[in-house]
Image (cartoon, rainbow, N blue to C red):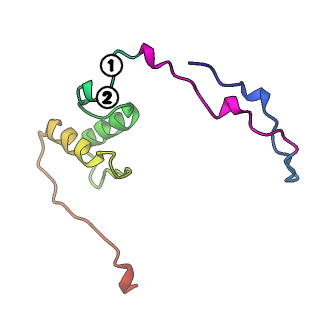
Amino acid sequence: MDDPLPPSSLRETSASGGTGSAALPVAMLYRHADASTLNFKTTAELKPLDGPVGQQRALGALELGTKIRTPGFNLFVTGSAGSRMQKVVETLLKNARWDRPHPDDWVYVNNFADS
């Protein structure tokens, strides 16, 4: 892949709000990928991935959260639609070693219509 222009090739906006900068170079808007280096013709040839991709930090945090034994500790997970976060958390929790009693499930939801 071609490397984009280094940041030093761009001018910053002045503190007074004036741009005083050149237009963004076309090279910064496009990154070439050589498709001939891929070992498949279409993505239909690829096997589905098992598990999340590129989320090692999030998975590490979730795994740590399953090991914390302090009363009142909760995990809060959010993700965009299609990110499969619910499935990831379910799988992690199913695989976690549970040698302690399961806590009661409590969920508090604000009724904004009643505020």
Q: Give the range drawn in magenta.
A: 20-37
Left or right of residue 14: residue 2? left
Q: Is residue 91 magenta?
A: no
**Image position of 108 with respect to 21: above or below:** below
Secondary element under disc 2, as helix, strand or loop, is helix
Rendered-image quadrant of the N terminus = top right
Q: Determine contact: label 2, label 1, CB under 8 Å.
A: yes
Residue drawn at 37 percent across, 83 percent down: 113
Amino acid type, callout 2: Thr
Q: Is residue 34 magenta?
A: yes
Residue 29, percent from left and from top: 64, 35
Q: Nearer the viewer, residue 63 or 31?
A: 31
Neighbor class of circle 1 (other Cα within 10 Å; few <14, some 14-19, many 20+) is: few
Residue 63, percent from left and from top: 28, 36
Residue that label 2 marks: 43
Residue drawn at 31 percent across, 40 percent down: 62
Residue 55, percent from left and from top: 38, 34
Amino acid type, callout 1: Phe
Residue 10, percent from left and from top: 78, 33
Q: Is the magenta stretch mostly helix, strand or loop?
A: loop
Residue that label 1 marks: 40
Rendered-image quadrant of the C terminus = bottom left
Neighbor class of circle 2 (other Cα within 10 Å; few <14, some 14-19, many 20+) is: few
Residue drawn at 32 percent across, 48 percent down: 82
Residue drawn at 18 percent across, 60 percent down: 105
Q: How many marks?
A: 2
